[in-house]
Amino acid sequence: MSKRDVKIREQRFFDTETAQELWQQRQDMGWPYHLSPFSVLIAAMGNHWHAGCRDALESMAKYTFNTGYDVVFYEEHDRCYQPYDGLGIMRNLAYQRAIREGFEFICYVDNDVKPAEDALVKLQRRFIPVIAPIIVYSDGKSHGLSMPTMAQNQGLAMITSCVLSMVLFQTSVFLPFATSPFWQDSLGADETYHFSKLAMAGHRPFVDTDVVVECVAPPSYPLDKTVGRTVQDLVL
């Protein structure tokens, strides 16, 4: 018998019909297999919520779960002593948890975003390593950023960097950084720096212009305007 005649067998058992359907869907589309397809860790950076934001994110988490995906929505402990000085550590802890617990995706969210309940599922179904929605601000201003002025409902757009108010990553993006943290703390290590670092690893972010998420608090630039104020001050 030649090696060509040997059949390699695999048996896969599913606890629900939904899990089997998800696995079969991935196989039919030629996408990589995963023990828990589309599973997602929603990592909130802190617990200093603006009005209505946590409720909106909880609704999004429940909708994602009801779609058939495994979901954890949690608040990362605020490690900032000065404004933003611990965000890198918080983001590193979040993706390390996502890798350890076997999630396929990690969705970073700030405490001031109000996504529609189906926003995350729409981003996940694009199956792109790094993807964000269009972020618009409640006051209707762009605050010097290009993202709020992007044309909507135009499909996918490749970009160089974006705000981190809500960004979805496949956890595999962070595997090379499992033991050497990817995110650095401010000041200086801004979005441009981190997305340039990702570009060196072959990843460019996309925006799904069909998904728009409201941010209720405008960005603070430059960061030194906030020095001397606590993190709680920034969100109240």
Image (cartoon, rainbow, N blue to C red):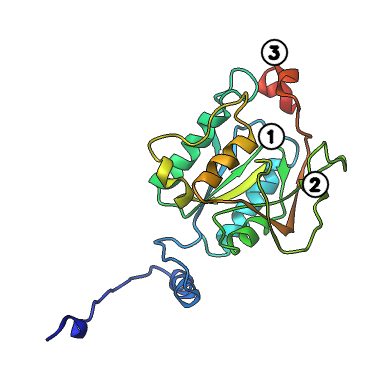
Q: Nearer the viewer, mark 3 or mark 1?
A: 3
| Closer to us: 41 or 179 | 179
Residue count near mark 1 (Cα–Cα under 10 Å), binned few <14, some 14–19, many ≥20: some
Tell me the residue at 25%/77% (across/down).
9
Marks 3 and 1, how far apart in space? 20 Å
Q: Nearer the viewer, mark 1 or mark 2?
A: 2
Instruction: State the residue position of label 3.
Output: 228
Query: Looking at the picture, how far across and down is residue 121, in whole percent?
Result: 62, 60
In screen coordinates, is 36 left or right of 156?
left
Q: Earlier in the sequence, mark 1 or mark 2?
A: 1
| Secondary structure beneath label 3 | loop
| Secondary structure beneath label 1 | loop
Instruction: State the residue position of label 1.
Output: 49
In screen coordinates, is 186 left or right of 177?
right
For the question of whether residue 73 can be seen, the reply is no
Amino acid type, mark 1 = Trp
Quadrant location of the N terminus?
bottom left
Tell me the residue at 43%/70% (across/down).
16
Q: Earlier in the sequence, mark 3 or mark 1?
A: 1
Marks 1 and 2, how far apart in space? 22 Å
| Closer to us: 31 or 79 | 31
Instruction: State the residue position of label 2.
Output: 148
| Closer to us: 210 or 3 | 3
Tell me the residue at 74%/42% (across/down).
52
Q: Earlier in the sequence, mark 2 or mark 3?
A: 2
Marks 2 and 3, how far apart in space? 29 Å
